[in-house]
Amino acid sequence: MSVKLIGRTTNLYGKTLWEILGNLRTTGVGRLVTRNSYDRYEEPSFFRVLSVEPTAQIEDKARKIIVHAEKIFRGKHYKEPVEIYSVSYKPDYRLIPKDEEQLWWDRLANCKPREKFVPGSIELPPLMKLVLERDNKDSNIKLQLKIRGGRDNVAKSDITKIASYGPSFFKNQQSS
Amino acid sequence: MQNLCKVELLYGKLLCKTKAINQQPVRYTRKPRWLPKAPTKMFRVPVRPQISPDENKELFRLYTNYRTTMKSIQEQLEYELETSYTGQEVLQEIANKEEVLWAKCMDVNDNWNAEVATEREQRLAKEREDRREEILAQLIEKEEDKKKKLEAVEEIIRLEKEKSKTYITVENIDEAIEKALDNVVDHKYALDLAGNIFKGNDPNEPTTGTMSFQTLGVQSIN
């Protein structure tokens, strides 16, 4: 019997966390789980389950569970374990078979860390420069570019580089 | 949207506009949020937007750069604002400018005051002169009035003095008594309808001429 899907399409395919972990012995503690949406990245991204705590089933909805896991995202091993609760219902997870686990750890060990250098400052915009000249102020200054701090933001500012003001001012620098 | 139009109209009325400029009636373009999905749209599946990954990446890059740059520009502007406010020279310059402006205003005001003062002096002098003349005229008039009254009074006095020659006094009382006794006046008389005066006790003999009714003012009984 062929299944015909109707309704809106989705990016998610796979199983929910409870569907995977609920069927394993000792609820899969110590096993590796990954998300299918992480396949878009070259670097390995997966979770190592540390503890599982199921929550109440609500009617026909997918069950949510509280999972504490070690997270490896884009080749970076997080120092502290993360809690998966609000996204645990998504049918996006995939269990890594036991014989492939070593392969993933090897991939993690072999992948090189991501690097990204962006210019540390930028030229003054043309109109602003004119205004500063009109007011007899120093118009040879550069504007400092600040990088927003984030857990997964690997960008580092390169002070020696100066971006020129234009529509595609650091296109080349960001390609790395 | 309708409410917005109403408000626009209301303000138009309040501002005494003859016609609201932005008046554009718009009907409801969508159902309220709390109503369920329309029966005709119940099984409609919206087409998923196809976003090319290249375009998506490029847009992400552009927006990231835009936000980063805007933040730094904003910071620069804030810095300039701070420095412009705290600078002592700038404050002094502003104060000087205001002082100059104030002096200019005061100069204009003084000139104007002087102009008005000369005008006022002239006007007051003229008014004073007018008033003096008026008072003088009044005085002369009063003087004349007084003179006239005095003359009238003197005339009366003169007439009275003339009359006083005929007054009965202690000296000539006997003479007067004699005169009165000589000319006895009999006021006892009768009148008939024709106005004849009858003196004495006989009614058939009219002693004096007739008198008209009109002059006497006697009314006929019949």
Image (cartoon, coloured by chain):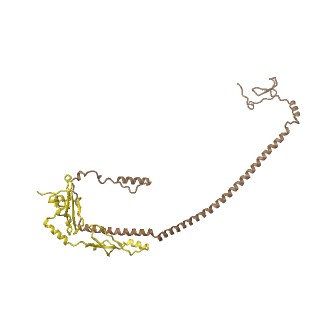
On screen, residue B213 above or below A116: above
Q: Give coordinates of residue B156: x percent, y percent.
A: 79, 43
Judged left or right of residue A155, residue B129 is right
On screen, residue B39 above or below A9: above
Q: Visible in this render: residue B69?
A: yes
Residue B7 or residue A122, whichever sits in front = A122
Q: Give the chain coloured brown.
A: B
Give the mark count. 0
Choose top left, top right, bottom left or bottom right for residue A121: bottom left
Residue at 40% over, 69% down? B79
Residue B119 or residue B106, whichever sits in front = B106
Residue at 37% over, 54% down? B5
On screen, residue B35 above or below B217: below
Choose top left, top right, bottom left or bottom right for residue B26: bottom left
Q: Give coordinates of residue B77: x percent, y percent.
A: 39, 69
Judged left or right of residue B221, residue A76 is left
Q: Give coordinates of residue B74: x percent, y percent.
A: 37, 68
Q: Residue furthest bottom?
A: A160
Residue at 14% over, 67% down? A100
Judged left or right of residue B28, residue B196 is right
Residue B189 or residue A175, whichever sits in front = A175
Q: Specify the quadrant that holds the N terminus of chain B.
A: bottom left
Q: Visible in this render: residue B59?
A: no
Q: Residue furthest left?
A: A1
Q: Give coordinates of residue B7: x percent, y percent.
A: 39, 53
Q: Specify the quadrant that holds the C terminus of chain B.
A: top right
Q: Give the chain coloured yellow.
A: A
Choose top left, top right, bottom left or bottom right for residue B67: bottom left
